[in-house]
Structure formats: C-alpha cells, structure tokens
C-alpha cells in the first residue's frame, strides 16, 4: 500500500500536515523493538521500500484515418494540416502530415518502447475533464511540452493541426494497465475544440488570452486501435504501414429535439434562432421573438424541430472504456448555439450563447425534459439563457417519435425576501462594491436597491410579482440569485460579483421558518464563498385569489430586535504602513438609518500605531435571531484617504444567544481574507491543525513548510529501561522480597524517583520546540487584555487582505434603564485606566529577534542566487534609537546562498508601546542601484508583551521557533518563509539575559561508516545453494549516488551469509538526503544478478542528534528486513548492520579502511575465509569421494553376481553330466 500526498505549491507556501492515526498498526514482529532484542530501537530509523521488477513492452497504435476536420484560421491564412502524435515516457513519434484534406488517411502504426510497472488509476470521467482542461491551457504546447505530460503510467495521444506553430486540437490519455490487459479494437475518438476566429482581432485574442478559451465546437474525429505486446528487450521507436483495419460498421440514427421554453436571464436580443448540433450535423429553429413576459414564443409548431438524421458507428463488444472522453456508441456530444437575428439581413451571424451537453447526460436523462443553461460567448462565466428541451435518439428504421409533452403555463405569485449579503468579492485595490441583488425566475426579475460600499450589505426588502410557470413545477427552472456591483460612473457597466441557484422544489407556499443563507459562486475568486440571506414563497394565483388573507404579504421584513447597550473601549490601531493623520469613523445600521460616530484624536503613538483609548456607549436595537449579521463598521482614514476598514461582528457577544449559536455565528460571520487562501487554498477555519503550542486544545489551520513535508516527527527520542535484563516488571502496589513497599504513597513507582544529569553542548536552536506556522495562530482572546479585529483593504484577487489590526474591548448588555448605562461606563473607565497604566510601563523595551533561515524565496527579478540580507525595524527612519538600542537595522552580512539562505543572527531592537508595536522584518536582495524587497513579515510585539503565556515561556526560555510567511505589497502570493523566534523584555532584563548561541544549520562534512555483518533467512527456492552479496546506495545530492558492494558469499546452503564488510560514505549534515538503501542480491556467473529484496534505513533522526555528541556517534547493530514488490510483505531476507557517524576531521585523524582493508578498527572486522571462492573444493572432494565409493560398491556387487552366476552354471553342468 502506498500513501501519497500530491499538491501544487508556490515558493515558500505552507503545506498542510498529514497526521496518520493508523500508522504503525501493522508492524512486523521483526521490526518491533519490544519483540526483537537484537533490533530494538531500529523502528525509528528503518523502513522498507521495495524495488520494482520491470518488464518490457512494445506499444502499437494504429492511426487509421480522420473525418470532418475543420480548417483553422491562422495569421498567414487557413490551415488544414492534421497529424497525430503519440507520447510516452519522454519518447514521441508522429504520423505524416496530410494537407488540405478534411478526411485524411494515415494507415500507419506507431510503436514505442515501454517499461513497467508504473500504474496510476484515473477514472475515465476525471481524465476527460483533465484532457479538456489541458487543451484550454495548452493550445501552444510545442512551446512547453512539460506543462501537460502526465507521468509514465499513461500514454498520451495528441491531434495537431499545422506543421509549424501548430495548434493542439485534442489530447487523449490511455492507461497502460488497461492496455496491457486488452487490445483495443478500432474506435472513433471525437475531437472538440474552440471556435475558429473569423477575423484578425479574434485571432490575436485567441493567441493571447488562451486561458479563457473553451471547447465550443466539434472539430472532427480519428479512428485508432491500440495494443501492447511483451518482449524480451525494449525496441526503438518507429512508424510503419499498418495492417488492413476494418472500419466499424455504420448505422443511421435519427435525433428528435423539442423546445418548450427559452428564458433570458439578462437583457437579451428581441429576435434569436437556436441551433442544435451533433457532430457534423445540425438543425436550427425559425426566428423566435421575445414575448411580453420576457420569454420567447414557443409553440407546438416552432418548438418541434425537424428530424436530424445522423450516421454513427456501431458498438463493439469491447468498447474502449479506458480512453478519456470515449462515450457509448462513439456518439458526439450535443452543442446548442443561440444566435442573434438582426433586421439588416446578411449571411454573417454572431454567436450569442452556447452550451455543450455530454451525450452521457442526454442518454441518462432519457425522454425527460432538461433545463440547459447557455453561457455567454464573450464571458464564459455568465449564463444568459435557460432553455427547456427534450432529446430522443432512435435507430432510423425503428424509431417512432413520441408525442410532444403537454406544456401548459399557470400564473403564480412569487415573493422574494432579500435580507443581507455576506463576504462579497472586492473589485480592485481599495474599491468596495456598490451592490444590488437580482432574483430571476423563468425570465421574471426582482431587483433590490443599491447598498453603498460594503462587503456585508443589508437590504431588508420584500417584493412580489406574478410569474408564468409550468403547471408541472418539476419542469420549471430554479431561482437564480445574482449580485452585481453597480457602476459609479455614467459610462461604465455593472459587474457581476457572484451568482447561484436555489431549488424551486424547496420553496413553500408560506415561509414560516427563519431565512436561510445561500452560498454563491464568486466570479472573482473560485475559493471565495459569498452568501446571501433570503426567503421565498410561491403561491398559485388561483389559491391566492380564493383566500388572499391566508397568504399575507409583508413589505417590512426587518428582524425583531432587542434594545441593547454596546459598551466599547477603542484602544487603537496597528497598521503595517505608516500614516500621519489618523481618523476613525464608527458606523452601525442599515443605509439611511446608519449611525455614525467620529473618534477623537489619538492620545499617543506614531507612524501607523496609535492609541485612542476612548470609550463609547451606543444604544442600538440588535436582532434577536443569530441568522442576522449585526456588526460595527470602523473606517480608518489617513486624513481624507480611507486606508482600511474593519467589520466587528457582534453576534458572538449577544448575551441572549446560546453558546452553540454564538459559536456558529462566529464561524459564519468571520471575515474571509486573502491570508486564509495563501497556504492551502481553503479558508483557515475549515481545516484541522495539530495541537497548538500554547493551548492543549486543537486549533484550526496548521500548515507545514515545504522542506518539512517528508520529515517524520518523533515524540520521544530515548527509551530508558528501569530494570536489568532478566528482571520481570513489578505490578503496582507490589512488595519486594525484603518486604519493602515499592510504591510511594501517591501510587508512584519509587524507582522513577531519580534525576538524570546530562551535559549537552548542543546549540540553543536545536533544543527549542518548532511550530510550522506563525505563533499568533495560537493566541486566544483569553490570553490578551483586549480583543482584536483585522483591518482590511480590497485587492485585485477579489478577497480583502489584512493591512493592520484594530484593538478594542466590547461588552453588549440588554438596555433597560439609565443606571445600567452609567454602570457600564464606569466599568469601561476602570479598564481604560488599567490599560493606560500598562502602556505607561511599556516604554523601555527590547525586541530580541533571532533569524535562522529563509526558505523558498521568490524574487521579483527571478534571480536564482540573490545576495540576501535582513532589514529589521519598527520605524522607517534610520538612526532612531531607544537608549542604546537601534530601531532600524540593516544587516551588513550579505549571504550568497541561493533561495535558502542561512542567517543565524540575533537583532536587538529598541521598542516602546504603542509607537513601535509592529516589527517589520524584510528579506532583501542587494542590487546594483536599488535593493529589492523579496518579502516582509509583520510581527505584533504588543500581543507578545501583554500575553501572559508568552511571558511564561520567556521566563522558562522556551519560546518556540516559528515559520513566518513573507509577502510584498504588490503581490497577493507568498514570497517565501522565515524561520525565527522573538523575545520581548525590558531593558534591565535585556542587559542581564545573555544572547543565545545560534548554530547547527551550516552544513558540515561527515563520514558515514556502515558495517554489514550478516545475512539470514534467504530462501533457496528449490536450489541446493545460493551466492549472496549486499549493495548499499546513498544519495549525496540531487545528481549523485554513491553505490558500494560487499564481496560475494558463495554457495550458502542454509540462506545465511557472513560478510564483515565496511562501507564509507562522505555526507553533509544537515542534509535533505538521509536515506540509505540496502539491497540483497543473488549472484550468478552466467547472467545478471537477481534482486532478492531491499530495505531503506532513514538516518534523519541520527543526523539531528549527531551534533550533540563529541567524537563518534554510534548506531548499534540491528536487522533490516528486505522485501520485494512481487512478493508483497513477505520478508525474503534480513541484513545485520551497524553504523557510525564521524566528523571529517576525525575521519582523517582516525581513518578506517573500505571492506576489510587496513586500518581495520572501530570496529574490528574478523576476516571471513569460508565461502569466498566460486568453486567449493571441499564439495568437489566430497563429490569425488562419493563417486569413488559408489563405483567400488558397484564393482563389489557385480563380482558377487558373476560369481553366483558362475556357480549356478557350474551346478547345472554337473547335473547334466551326472544324467
């Protein structure tokens, strides 16, 4: 079983940690330290990784012919030059180019070599979408072939048009696993491509904007067959004429289409016609005009299209199911096109909307009507029409067209209650949308008013309209919900922000429950999740007229509220960039009833860090239900420019909600920011993470570092036995032989009451805990004397990003009387005084920043070996100090260490709160004229100083190493990570607390000495003896492997062998390469050696320990089990090894020899004399002795037989003479 994790990550992106709860549940006894005395402790460093037994195949592809190829418009004219290319494992071959023939005949066989096994299982459906997607992004794949090549487990087949600057028409993938088991009969593969541009403007657009193109047209088909044949040796690639291939028999079929309704979803043309296309065949309607109720007039005459006769291939008994995109009966997908009909005439028509319907869906739907959403040809993300159709496909000689379904329309009262929206997409940098909601049902629209500049707009509007829907509501379309950004200028158009659908079957006649949040799909960012709070009612008009009082309409749908008092202490703002004239405006309410409060000038602070320390008592009516989002809106200005906005959600603070409701509302209304998507592509609140460093409970969103994704983490390094060998463990409460109680009064074993003193000269960095994320992730509200909310601004990615923090304290109470307000004001005043006292004492501080290493740096210039240094500051002005400590430090030590520079530096930075609350650390690239900022991380030192748990870690000298993300202002992606830890202290402590020694990260030269002692338990497999040797492979870097072999132990009769052989490997520590592969071979004189099995020893844990020890670091003897892929988990032999690690200087001072060469020491390897010759002379002597003995024994019995026969003959002669 192979457990893998596959992902695509940018430079420096964090990677989610996978925790395997079932790991180690099936450990062989030979690997169990408790069950194998000889191999105890080997489990932590030893794993088994078999090597695959390969086989050779030749892959044959018969490329027979093509049909219906369409010429493509190019820059230099029309191109029709189709050819087929087959690609596998870096080897490719292609057919001849057939020019200017839409029905090319190749009749060629392409053959390629193949080595197996390397299998991956893809479903045909998944491969189909992969193939389609690859076409969209690989129209010019000749420029970058590696962007689409899937690994050796698949064979790729490509159809191209054009000898030079060709266009990829189609891409297929074939699984080798199925190809080896079955030979595929001739089969048609359908090709779908983009619409050929009709003018130079669209041609250039297709060449430049290929990522938005879609497969909108049928482009032809090819006939192929394939097979795989096992051979002794892999042949070379080539092409040859194929044998005569019988084309699949054809059969005529007939397709009947019925159209029942065409509903426009936006402003639409007054006259249209609709075309249904399947393969090279198509049929269209007559011009259709829009009706008064904004749907197109469809009746039994114009909605019943003429029969469409098509020619298809017949089924084979073994259809090619493994081909991506292959469908039953080789039928084409159905395309629906909608054209605008103008009044000026002319043959040139513009395609307005389109839809591709897979034939599998049509076949599964049967004769049931289906709604088809037609997308815009200019904006594929926008749906323009909803069409209700039926399809019927029958054989031409058997089919009978069904009657048209009775499609009658009834009138209904449709009501839409629009309450709020949540997490709307941004438009651009610092551009909040003016949003409106549009509800569409069967061509009828309900539009809300416009909410100004908010990501969480409120509407509270209820509207009703009459609609025409089918009497059978199962045929009616769903409700479409769209949110638009209304234009702010006259000559601009509104922009679609997000859209979604609500099932009509879920809409009742009377909505009696709370409104529901409906998730929409963002048009700006596919990972973003907007919501809208709505409710709907659908009432037959007849029922409504009969009893209108039963279904009352409420135009005022504002939620019921409770009079409340919000007690707010606004502490201040902490921005990542400096501002000079801060202003804050607080808003609460909806549109016209919105209340605004201006905050006074700051009491202290500078740059972007200011304290206001103002108290506010706000009387407001807050909603009773948790479904309604209530929040305070803080607008942060630098003079007249808005630099950020904060949404302070009040729902988790409402005292009348249950704890479950407060928790649910906290998750629902938490603002979605760009940082949530940088690491994992998901919102941080929706992924699990391991235990937090500061809290015992699990917290959300742990991401690991790229370089740590394959590192095993061990909770305990050392195992100590408290008993001597041979002693049995005592049970709790037992009495020793002399009558003394072995247990303390508290039930603790007295033998555990001891101290171990260990001298450890390891550098400080290796003794610290390490967390693969930023330490702020573990801070909770209870850890700080205040609350926080992010200050955000819009980005072009459609999701806001954090630009600072708002710090405050807030309490909500039910407001009943004036005395309650006075009491709340006194409480806030007391808290304010405490904070003033805290800040007055936080002036002479020191931030001690330990920088270890940067990883995965992504420079804007693309430099692979930048000259990096660190820039640490909490003010932008150079030369500023607090006491003797600078506040702006540029490291003078420039590193030229590539994209993973090691710094191992400590910076002491003066700090005063709140003026220097934000510490900025930038990794810089030294330039000729100006230095480049590779990435910056922002650290809130104030949170660390006021956090009691962090201060406790400081006192214990246990601040963990954290991994911080580097970002830039001009980019929304990670530019790398920085390993570091941060300490906060006052000046007095800084003078008495020594700076920790940082070391252990620079690679050092070592020598790995491995001794192979013995091999045991190798199966003879029907032979009388076997010759064995061991191979050791160690990878020293990306390009080099060091391979060493022992001598050969000849003619082992019991599957055991002795070697006493030493391998020496030069290594560097630390290193990404820490696995030693051991292989066990059976030697043969006349043929190549056969692999019996292999095992892998992971030395990463030993590499981490080696610097703790002076001199030799020894790894005791243990057994490594060897397995083979063909034998599953069966152990085919075991190798006993011993290892040691020594520094390069010690290796030169105390050398040892390779194999059994001198100097032979540490350990001494006794020479092995037995079984060291190919011919076993002792066995030869025994054979001759046995043969001689057999001959003499045979002669003796032969003589006795002759003597007996002679005596018997003599006796007969005497008898004859006597007679």
Image (cartoon, rainbow, N blue to C red):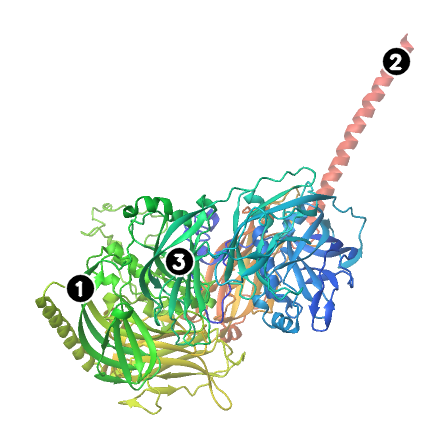
The residues bearing labels 3 and 1 have C-alpha atoms spaced at a distance of: 30 Å
Residue 461 disc label: none
Kindly state the secondary structure of the residue where label 1 is placed. strand
Residue 481 versus residue 859 in the image, above or below: above
Determine which of the numbered discs, if any, sits on residue 1214 in the image: 2
The quadrant in which the C terminus is found is top right
Residue 657: give x, y in percent of width and height. 22, 56
Q: Is residue 476 left or right of residue 326?
A: left
Of the residues tagged 3 and 2, which is closer to the observer?
A: 3
Please, what secondary structure does the residue beneath circle 3 have? strand
How crowded pointer 1 is (Cα within 10 Å; few <14, some 14-19, many 20+) is rated as: some
- Give the residue number, with chain letter if any, for mark 3: 519
- Residue 96, percent from left and from top: 78, 62
Q: Residues within 10 Å of mark 3 (few under 14, many from 20)?
A: some
Q: Nearer the viewer, residue 135 or 1116?
A: 135
Compared with 434, 219 (above or below) is above
Whether residue 961 can be seen here:
yes
Residue 875, compared with residue 244, is above or below; it is: below
Task: Looking at the image, tell me whether mark 3 or mark 1 is earlier in sequence order.
Answer: 3
- The reply to whether the C-beta atoms of the residues labelled 3 and 2 are less than 8 Å apart is no
Location of residue 692 in the rendering, given as x and y in whole percent from the top left corner: 33, 63
Q: Secondary structure at mark 2?
A: helix
Residue placed under numbered mark 1 in the picture:
564
Tell me the distance, in whole angstroms, between the alpha carbons under discs 2 and 1: 145 Å
Q: Earlier in the sequence, mark 2 or mark 1?
A: 1
């Amino acid at each position: 079983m192979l457990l893998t994790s596959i992902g695509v990550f940018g430079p420096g992106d964090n990677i989610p940690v996978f925790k395997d709860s079932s790991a180690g549940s099936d450990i062989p006894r030979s690997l169990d330290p408790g069950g194998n005395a000889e191999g105890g402790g080997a489990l932590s460093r030893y794993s088994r990784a078999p090597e695959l037994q390969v086989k050779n195949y030749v892959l044959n592809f018969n490329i027979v012919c093509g049909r219906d190829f369409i010429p493509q418009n190019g820059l230099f004219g029309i191109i029709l030059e189709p050819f087929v290319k087959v690609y596998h494992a870096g080897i490719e071959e292609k057919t001849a180019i057939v020019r200017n023939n839409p029905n090319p005949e190749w009749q060629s066989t392409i053959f390629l070599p193949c080595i197996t096994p390397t299998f991956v299982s893809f479903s045909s459906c998944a491969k189909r979408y992969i193939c389609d997607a690859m076409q969209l992004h690989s129209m010019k794949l000749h420029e970058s072939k590696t962007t689409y090549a899937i690994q050796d487990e698949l064979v790729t087949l490509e159809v191209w048009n054009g000898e030079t600057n060709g266009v990829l028409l189609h891409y297929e993938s074939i699984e080798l696993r199925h190809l080896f088991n079955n030979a595929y009969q001739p089969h048609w593969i359908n090709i779908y491509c983009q619409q050929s541009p009709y003018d130079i403007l669209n041609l250039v657009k297709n060449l430049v904007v290929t990522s938005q193109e879609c497969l909108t047209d049928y482009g032809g088909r090819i006939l192929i067959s394939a097979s795989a044949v096992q051979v002794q040796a892999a042949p070379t690639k080539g092409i040859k004429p194929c044998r005569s291939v019988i084309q699949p028999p054809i059969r005529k079929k007939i397709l009947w289409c019925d159209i029942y309704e065409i509903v426009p979803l936006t402003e639409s043309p007054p006259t249209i016609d609709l075309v249904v296309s399947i393969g090279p065949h198509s049929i269209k309607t007559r011009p259709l005009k829009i009706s008064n109720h904004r749907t197109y007039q469809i009746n039994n005459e114009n909605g019943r299209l003429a029969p469409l006769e098509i020619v298809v291939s017949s089924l084979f008994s073994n259809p090619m199911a493994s081909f991506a995109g292959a469908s039953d009966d080789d039928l084409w997908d159905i395309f629906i096109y909608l054209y605008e009909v103008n009044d000026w005439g002319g043959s040139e028509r513009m395609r307005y909307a389109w839809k591709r319907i897979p034939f599998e869906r049509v076949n599964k739907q049967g004769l049931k009507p289906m709604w088809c959403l037609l997308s815009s040809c200019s904006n594929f993300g926008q749906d323009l029409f909803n069409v209700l159709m039926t399809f019927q496909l029958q054989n031409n000689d058997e089919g009978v067209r069904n009657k048209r379904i009775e499609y009658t329309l009834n009138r209904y009262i449709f009501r839409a209650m629009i309450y709020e929206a949540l997490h709307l997409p941004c438009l651009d940098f610092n551009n909040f949308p003016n949003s409106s909601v549009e509800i569409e049902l069967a061509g009828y629209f309900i539009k809300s008013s416009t909410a100004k500049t908010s990501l969480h707009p409120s509407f509270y509007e209820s509207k009703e309209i009459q609609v025409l829907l089918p009497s059978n509501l199962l045929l009616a379309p769903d409700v479409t919900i769209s949110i638009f950004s209304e234009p702010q200028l006259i000559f601009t158009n509104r922009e679609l922000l997000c859209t979604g659908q609500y099932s009509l079957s879920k809409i009742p006649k009377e909505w009696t429950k709370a409104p529901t949040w409906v998730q929409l799909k963002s048009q700006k960012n596919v990972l973003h999740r907007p919501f809208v709070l709505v409710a709907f009612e659908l009432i037959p008009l007849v029922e409504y007229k009969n009893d209108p009082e039963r279904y009352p309409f409420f135009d005022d749908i504002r939620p019921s509220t409770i009079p409340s008092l919000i007690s707010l202490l606004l502490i201040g703002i902490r921005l990542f960039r400096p501002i000079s004239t801060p202003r804050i405006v607080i808003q609460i309410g909806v549109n016209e009833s919105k209340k605004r409060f201006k905050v006074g000038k700051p009491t202290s602070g500078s740059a972007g860090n200011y304290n206001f320390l103002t108290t506010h008592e706000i009387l407001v009516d807050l909603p009773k239900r948790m479904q309604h989002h209530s929040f305070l809106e803080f607008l942060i200005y630098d003079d007249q420019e808005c630099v950020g906005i904060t949404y302070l959600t009040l729902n988790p603070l409402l005292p009348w909600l249950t704890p479950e409701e407060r928790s649910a509302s906290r998750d629902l209304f938490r603002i979605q920011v760009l940082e949530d998507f940088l690491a994992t592509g998901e919102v941080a609140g929706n992924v699990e993470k391991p235990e937090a460093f500061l809290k015992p409970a699990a917290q959300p969103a742990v991401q690991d570092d790229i370089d740590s994704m394959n590192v095993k983490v061990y909770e305990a390094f050392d195992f100590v036995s408290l008993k001597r060998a041979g002693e049995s463990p005592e049970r709790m409460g037992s009495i020793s032989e002399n009558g003394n109680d072995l247990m303390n009064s508290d039930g603790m074993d007295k033998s555990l009451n001891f101290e171990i003193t260990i001298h450890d000269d390891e550098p400080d960095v290796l003794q610290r805990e390490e967390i693969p994320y930023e330490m702020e992730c573990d801070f909770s509200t209870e850890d700080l004397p205040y609350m926080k909310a992010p200050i955000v601004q819009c980005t072009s990615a459609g999701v806001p990003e954090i630009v600072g923090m708002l710090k405050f304290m807030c309490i909500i109470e039910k407001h009943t009387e004036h005395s309650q307000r006075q009491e709340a004001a006194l409480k806030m005043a007391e808290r304010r005084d405490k904070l003033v006292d805290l800040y007055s004492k936080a002036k002479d501080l020191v931030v001690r920043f330990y920088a270890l290493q940067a990883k995965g740096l992504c420079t804007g210039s693309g430099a692979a070996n930048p000259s990096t240094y660190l820039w640490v500051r909490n003010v932008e002005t150079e030369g500023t100090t607090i006491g003797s400590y600078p506040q702006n430090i540029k490291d003078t030590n420039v590193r030229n260490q590539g994209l993973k520079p090691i710094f191992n530096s400590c910076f002491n930075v003066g700090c005063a709160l709140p003026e220097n609350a934000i510490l900025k650390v930038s990794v810089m690239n030294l330039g000729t004229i100006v230095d480049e900022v590779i990435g910056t991380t922002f650290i809130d030192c104030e949170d660390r100083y006021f956090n009691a748990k962090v201060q406790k870690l400081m006192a214990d000298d246990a601040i963990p190493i954290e991994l911080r993300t580097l970002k830039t202002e001009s980019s929304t992606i990670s530019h790398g990570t920085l390993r570091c830890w941060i300490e906060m202290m006052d000046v007095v402590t800084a003078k008495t607390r020594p700076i920790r020694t940082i070391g252990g990260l620079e690679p050092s030269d070592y020598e790995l000495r491995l001794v192979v002692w013995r091999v045991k338990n190798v199966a003879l497999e029907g032979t009388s003896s076997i010759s064995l040797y061991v191979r050791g492979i160690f990878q020293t870097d990306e390009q080099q492997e060091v391979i060493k072999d022992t001598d050969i132990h000849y003619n082992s009769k019991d599957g055991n062998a002795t070697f006493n052989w030493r391998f020496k490997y030069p290594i560097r520590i630390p290193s990404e390469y820490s696995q030693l592969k051991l292989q066990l071979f059976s030697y043969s004189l006349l043929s190549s050696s056969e692999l019996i099995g292999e095992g892998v020893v992971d030395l990463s844990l030993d590499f981490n320990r080696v610097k703790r020890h002076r001199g030799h670091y020894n790894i005791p003897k243990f057994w490594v089990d060897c397995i083979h892929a063909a034998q599953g988990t069966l152990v085919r032999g075991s190798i006993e090894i011993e290892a040691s690690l020594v520094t390069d200087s010690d290796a030169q001072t105390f050398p040892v020899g390779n194999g059994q060469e001198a100097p032979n020491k540490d350990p001494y390897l006794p020479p092995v004399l037995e079984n060291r010759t190919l011919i076993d002379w002792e066995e030869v002597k025994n054979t001759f002795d046995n043969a001689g003995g057999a001959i003499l024994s045979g002669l003796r019995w032969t003589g006795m037989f002759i003597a007996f026969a002679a005596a018997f003959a003599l006796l007969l002669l005497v008898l004859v003479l006597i007679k």
